[in-house]
Amino acid sequence: MAKLLSIRVRLLLLLLVPSMLYLGTSVFLLQQSKSNMEVLASSLYETTNKSTSLILNADRDMYQALTAYQLLVSGTLTAEEKTKQLKALKDNIDQTNTRVGQAADIMNAKQLLQTAHTETKMTIEQNIAGFHMYFDQWVKEANAVVQSSSTGKGIINDAKLIATFEKGREGMNQIGEILDAYGK
């Protein structure tokens, strides 16, 4: 009888030990999968999606500021419309700077500022600095033109001013491309 009990215990252990190991492995892998999903969600949503959205909205605000500037120097606005466009210009400039700052904060928190563009090798930090340099220069020059009350076609499409504006946008485009590559 003792040998029979011993065989039963052995058979029971032969069944229970692998089952317990299988159960333990399954729980561990489920926890690991959950952890990986949280990292992925953080990476894709909290970092890439939010930053990209802020950069795209800042880009839109830049163009709205440019449009307001062009309307102001067109010479076709009434006093009321001019006041409205001056406010739009200021608001869009402020929104652009705020959104770029928020995106920079997110990327800094995730330690992405040193991530470089594949072709130009410029980092996000360098692109943000370039954006600020050129955009601030554009803002200063555009405000000077608006304050001087200059108008006309040559003022609206001033090649130097548009080139400065576009150089500021280049940094924004590269940041967007870097974030797209990071997300992939």
Image: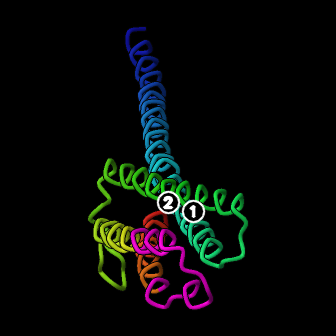
In the image, residue 161 sits, relative to residue 84, either above or below, namely below
- Examine the structure image and report whether residue 139 is included in the region drawn in magenta: yes
In the image, residue 164 sits, relative to residue 176, either above or below, namely below
CA gap between label 2 and label 1 equals 7 Å
x and y percent of residue 121 in the render? 29, 80
For the residues bearing labels 2 and 1, Cβ distance under 8 angstroms: yes
x and y percent of residue 127 in the render? 34, 71
Give me the disc on residue 93. 2
x and y percent of residue 118 in the render? 36, 80
Q: Amino acid at mark 2?
A: Ile
Q: Which of 166/7 is in front? A: 166
Q: Is residue 44 left or right of residue 86?
A: left
Main secondary structure along the magenta-highlighted residues: helix
- Crowd around label 2: few <14 · some 14–19 · many ≥20 (10 Å): many
Instruction: Tell me the residue that label 1 is attached to.
Output: 61
Q: Residue at x 43, y 8 (%)?
A: 1
In the image, residue 32 sits, relative to residue 149, either above or below, namely above
Magenta stretch bounds: 138-162
- Crowd around label 1: few <14 · some 14–19 · many ≥20 (10 Å): many
Q: Secondary structure at mark 1?
A: helix
